[in-house]
């Protein structure tokens, strides 16, 4: 067995990052296969998955806390991802799916994790009965549980985009918002619609344990916008090529820390080490913002001309540095641009620099997609579906993961605010194009796979 070695210099440098630059491990996520938890009733499936999760993950939180204390590295979240539930409970009805979701929530509460992902379906080429049952159960499940997160994959570069699923999810998102209206539609903050979803993603709300994964894995999601921001600010005269290299070197150091934590955790828990997801995941705290990094590069305000190019440089440098540091980089790995969770993004929206259209352009080069964006509560379901279709098309053509996590905030209009608190933050309600997309969305069918899919 090869010993993992970290030099004293790296330790000192990392300590400085932890002390003054908001570096942390955003999540340690245990992936658990539930493929052996099938059954013919909600009680049978729910009982099996509850017993397995609470058994396998019983020490997850304690091990995470021990590592935090021993290494002095903050681990913000301990989470679980499971096999997409539509695969496990394929014979159940929507009502039974809701019951199974409650078992997931109970299991998460029992082991002490803050979120459990995997109330999910993969429908990029079509539905099974179980897929439809799960999707129709999403609004009630997310409204009735605290820790369950849901996701649906509606497209892949190989298969195209399932527009029937996209249309249905526009309605599902509206229903979810309405059922959680008292909390500004917070249920929608726990629902992600993907194109090209990765199977090893530890980040919520879109995490699930893929069918090609081992029985149990430990995946690490790191953070570090504050560290990268500090490097950019320290080199105001550096040309862009030099700046890219500086960011790459920083990402290398951050990823090394993530791999160390992941390997220690997997060894102590006696399970496989999966991947390090080296995404720059911002928080609402000042100085922990991807938007501020872009502005430190020389943009007056995030969203102005040049923003997409700056984001492309940042995303590429982070990926290159991470790939050098670990042989097991996976998940999403890049720069997140969630509006409600990034103070700089919020300020850019307030200033009128950052619009929904500009955010869509930025998603063509960033880690994921339109994330934690508040829309007026009266936005039609067909418009929401069309936004999903646009984002999925970017992923489809560019062979990358894209996603949509948007909140049509009930009773809110452009310029109002939604308030979630914690890591989910707060966000201004953004303007939506007033022209309709209804007839396009209602055509349904499947947008065919692009020519890029013919790689065999």
Image (cartoon, rainbow, N blue to C red):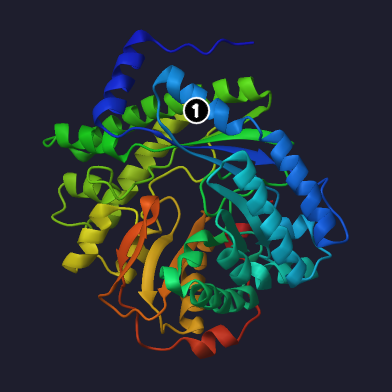
Residue that appears at 82% across and 58% down: 43
Q: Is residue 446 above or below residue 156?
A: below
The answer to whether any part of residue 432 appears in the image is yes
Please name whichever residue, 208 or 443, is drawn nearer the observer in this view of the structure. Answer: 208
Residue that appears at 11% across and 35% down: 237
Q: In which quarter of the image is residue 139?
A: bottom right
Q: Position of residue 196 (x, y in %)?
A: 58, 56
Q: Is residue 21 above or below residue 164?
A: above
Residue that appears at 12% across and 37% down: 236
Please name whichever residue, 45 or 387, is drawn nearer the observer in this view of the structure. Answer: 45
How many labels, in total?
1
Q: Where is residue 41 in the image (x, y as percent from the top left)?
A: 85, 61
- Which quadrant is home to the N terminus? top right
Q: Is residue 147 above or below residue 231?
A: below
Secondary element type, mark 1: helix
Q: Position of residue 264 (x, y in %)?
A: 55, 20
Q: Position of residue 39 (x, y in %)?
A: 87, 56
* Residue that carries the numbered disc 1 in the rendered image: 65
Residue that appears at 41% across and 78% down: 410
Q: Describe residue 217's horizontal placement relative to residue 317 as left or right.
A: right
Q: Is residue 236 above or below residue 196?
A: above
Badge 1 crowding class, 10 Å Cα cut-off, few under 14, some 14 to 19, many 20 or more, is some
The answer to whether any part of residue 326 appears in the image is no
Q: Describe residue 384's horizontal placement relative to residue 447 as left or right.
A: left
Q: Describe residue 243's horizontal placement relative to residue 160 as left or right.
A: left
């Amino acid at each position: 067995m090869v010993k993992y070695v970290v030099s004293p210099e790296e330790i000192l440098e990392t300590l400085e990052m932890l002390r003054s630059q908001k570096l942390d491990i955003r999540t340690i996520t245990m992936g658990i296969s539930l493929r052996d938890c099938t059954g013919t009733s909600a009680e049978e499936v729910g009982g099996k998955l509850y017993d397995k999760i609470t058994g396998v993950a019983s020490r997850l939180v304690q091990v995470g806390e021990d590592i935090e204390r021993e290494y002095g590295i903050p681990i913000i979240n301990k989470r679980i991802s499971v096999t997409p539930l539509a695969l496990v409970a394929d014979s159940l009805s929507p009502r039974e799916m809701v019951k199974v979701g409650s078992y997931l929530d109970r299991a998460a509460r029992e082991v002490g994790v803050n979120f459990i992902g995997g109330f999910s379906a993969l429908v990029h080429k079509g539905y099974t009965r179980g897929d439809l049952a799960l999707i129709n159960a999403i609004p009630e499940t997310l409204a009735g549980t605290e820790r369950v997160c849901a996701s649906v994959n509606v497209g892949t570069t190989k298969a195209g985009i399932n527009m029937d699923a996209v249309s249905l999810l526009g309605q599902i998102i509206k229903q979810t918002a309405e059922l959680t209206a008292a909390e500004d539609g917070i249920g929608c903050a726990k629902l992600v619609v993907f194109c090209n979803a990765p199977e090893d993603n530890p980040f919520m709300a879109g995490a699930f344990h893929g069918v090609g994964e081992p029985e149990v894995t430990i995946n690490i999601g790191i953070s570090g916008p504050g560290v990268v921001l500090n490097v950019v600010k320290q080199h105001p005269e550096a040309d862009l090529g030099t700046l890219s290299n500086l960011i790459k070197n920083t990402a290398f150091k951050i990823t090394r820390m993530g791999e160390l934590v992941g390997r220690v955790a997997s060894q102590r828990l006696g399970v496989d080490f999966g991947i390090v997801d080296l995404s720059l995941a911002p928080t609402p705290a000042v100085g922990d913002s991807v938007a501020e990094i872009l502005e430190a590069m020389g943009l007056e305000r995030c969203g102005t001309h040049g923003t997409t190019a700056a984001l492309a440089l940042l995303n590429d440098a982070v990926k290159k540095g991470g790939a050098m540091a670990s042989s097991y980089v996976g998940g999403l790995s890049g720069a997140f641009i969630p509006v409600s969770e990034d103070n700089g993004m919020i300020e850019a929206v307030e200033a009128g620099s950052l619009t929904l259209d500009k955010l869509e352009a930025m998603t063509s080069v960033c880690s994921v997609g339109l994330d934690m964006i508040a829309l007026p509560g009266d936005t039609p379901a067909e418009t929401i579906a069309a936004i999903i279709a646009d984002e999925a098309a970017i992923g489809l053509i560019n062979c990358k993961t894209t996603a949509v996590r948007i909140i049509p905030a009930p009773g809110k209009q452009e310029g109002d605010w939604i308030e979630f608190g914690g890591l989910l933050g707060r966000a201004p309600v953004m303007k939506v194009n007033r022209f309709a997309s209804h007839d396009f969305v209602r055509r349904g069918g499947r947008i065919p796979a692009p020519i890029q899919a013919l790689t065999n």
